[in-house]
Amino acid sequence: MADVIAAEFAKLRRSSVPWVTAAVMVVAVLGAALLIWIVRDPERAASLGLLGTKANLAGLEATWTAFGTYVTAIAGAGGLLLLAFVVTYLFGREYADDTAKNMLGLPTPRWRFVVAKLAVAAAWWLALVALLLAAAFGTGALLDLDGFSGTAAAGIVGGTLFAAGVSFLLVPVCAWITIATRSYLAPLGFALGMLLLGNLLGHTGWASWFPWSIVALLATGAGGPTVMPWTSYAVLVATFAVGIAGAIHRLAHADNP
């Protein structure tokens, strides 16, 4: 198993995609920092029109707690799309590069490829979250935000890691769709559609039963996650298990292209 995982990591050595995802994380933090910076100057916020209005309507304050709310959201709801991109790339590149036939022809149980790619995705995601936190604390320090303390820092780190973890529970479904369709577009379209549907159902009584709504509600910010019933966590775990089982089953019975 270790050699399969090592081979998956080796495939990334010359790829520029990890750097692209890292840039996305940094830009997201800078975007959140821009909103915080605008709020610190109400006159400038008003002069920027819609951007300033949005920040004021959100009740945003130039504090570490408010900034942490954005950081957690980046790892939570925002992470759903970025994770979908990562997993789709890891699985879909085999078909795009026409190397799937070589992978499926190896004398290795096919389930190992699924587990190895998801392990690489987890490591990749963990590195991105670490970068997110480093960029957030560095940017927050430059902005000299109010309210910094050990408790506030722990809340931001804990909330971000929690949001990143629950987001990862949904990515095996994207892997399953990628294997089934042998394309990039279908799983990315699915992820975007589920994110939009999750946002819609998040305002209804079905939110605690829909995985993408659950993640959005749990990733509420540095102040702590929304309290959800145990059944919501069971739904996330079940979605994770079904996604892995579906991906393994599909790859195990896939014809060699």
Image (cartoon, rainbow, N blue to C red):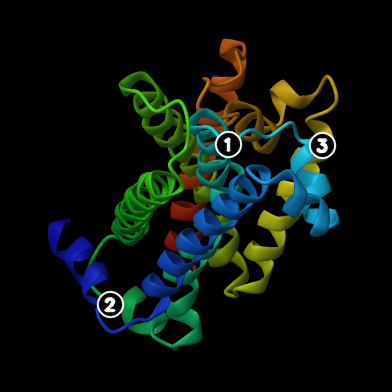
First in sequence: mark 2 vs mark 1: 2
First in sequence: mark 3 vs mark 2: 2
Residue at 82% across / 36% down in the picture?
Answer: 57
Q: Which mark is residue 62?
A: 1
In the figure, residue 160 lies in which quadrant? Answer: top left
Few, some or many C-alpha atoms within 10 Å of disc 3 (few <14, some 14-19, many ≥20)?
few
Residue 30 image offset from top left, x and y in percent? 52, 58
Q: Where is the N terminus found, in terms of image quarters?
A: bottom left
One can see residue 7 in this view: yes
Q: Which residue is mark 3?
A: 57
> In the figure, 36 relative to 254: above or below?
above
Residue 99 image offset from top left, x and y in percent? 38, 85
Q: Secondary structure at mark 2?
A: loop
Horizontal side of residue 57 vs 212, given as left or right: right
Residue at 50% across / 44% down in the picture?
Answer: 75
- Judge by depth and name the residue closer to the eye, 126 or 137: 137
Tell me the amino acid under the disc marked 1: Ala
Residue at 14% across / 64% down in the picture?
Answer: 3
Q: Which mark is residue 43?
A: none
Q: Which residue is mark 2?
A: 11
Task: Determine the CA span between mark 2 and mark 1.
Answer: 42 Å
Task: Determine the CA span between mark 3 and mark 2.
Answer: 46 Å
